[in-house]
Each structure stands twice: as structure tokens, then as C-alpha cells.
Image: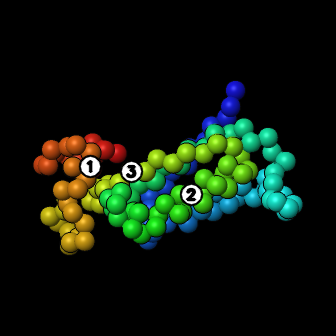
Amino acid sequence: MTARLVIGSPIYFGTATGETRSFIERLLFPYLTYTVPYGTPFPRKIKVGFIYTMNVSEERSREFGYEQIFNTNERYVNMLLGAAETLCAFDTCQVDDYSKVVIESFDPIAPFRAWHIQPGTDACHETR
């Protein structure tokens, strides 16, 4: 039986949270050997899934270079633990009611379109 691990994080200021980064570093470091090339004594039998949520579109995330962050995490997990995959949730809700805050840089309808929900419904709660 293969072990599985799912790691999730919102994307804040262009990267995973500090807590997530610290967790990944502490998870991987014990399995790293400083050989040439770097290696691991671990049999790499843990399948890891990364889930990232963000308030930008998929296109925008590419423009900002988020893919590099995701690929780096996958690369180290592949090297030290086993197979890794990434799932991204784009255009997530910022707040329950966009009319109550000044938040002009986000399209308040985008989460509805992305999640195929009718505007006027409780989209943030339905997608969580």
C-alpha cells in the first residue's frame, strides 16, 4: 500500500504561505543526502498532492510565474518522497460580499464564472 499526503495552501503575495513552506522544508530535509547528485535513502513511496487556491485567473497566475513555485515543490518531492501532482483552484472568492469592501483589483464575477455558479447565490460558501 502506498502512503498518500495532500498539502494545501492559499497563494498569498505570489507564493504558498510561510507555514506551508516551513512544513515542506521540515518534511523533506530529513530525507536529503548531500551526495553528488543529491539523493535520498528513502524508498520514495509516498504520493503527494499539492492543492493551491488563489484569487487570480489561470492566465494571470502564468503571467506572475506561479507555475515555477508549483514545479519547484513537485521537483523536490519527486526527488525525495515520490510522485507529486498539483491541483490549482483559480479565481477563488476573496470575501462573501464584494459590495461591502473596496476591492477593485479583483473581478467580483470571476469566481462565479470559474465555478459555474449563478451570481447572487452564496458562492463563497458553495465552493469551500
The tag earlier along the polypeptide, 1 or 2, is 2
**Tag 2: amino acid:** Asn
Q: Residues within 10 Å of mark 2 (few under 14, many from 20)?
A: some
In the image, farthest residue toward the left? 120
Query: Is residue 86 found left or right of 1 in the rendered image?
Result: left
Kind of residue indicated by mark 3: Ala
The percent coordinates of residue 56 (x first, y second) are: 33, 62
- SS under mark 3: strand
Label 1 belongs to which residue? 114
- Left or right of 56? Residue 1 is right
* Residue 52 higher or lower than 121, as above or below: below
Q: In the figure, is residue 27 to the left or right of 17?
A: right
What residue is disc 2 on?
A: 71
Please tell me which residue is depicted at 25% across the width and 53% down the height of the picture.
111
Q: Is residue 36 visible?
A: yes
Name the residue carrying label 3. 89
Mark 1 in CB contact with mark 3 (< 8 angstroms): no
Mark 3 Cα shell of 10 Å, populated few (<14), some (14-19), many (≥20): some
Residue 102 vs residue 81: left or right? Answer: left
**Callout 1 secondary element:** helix
Numbered mark located on residue 31 in the image = none
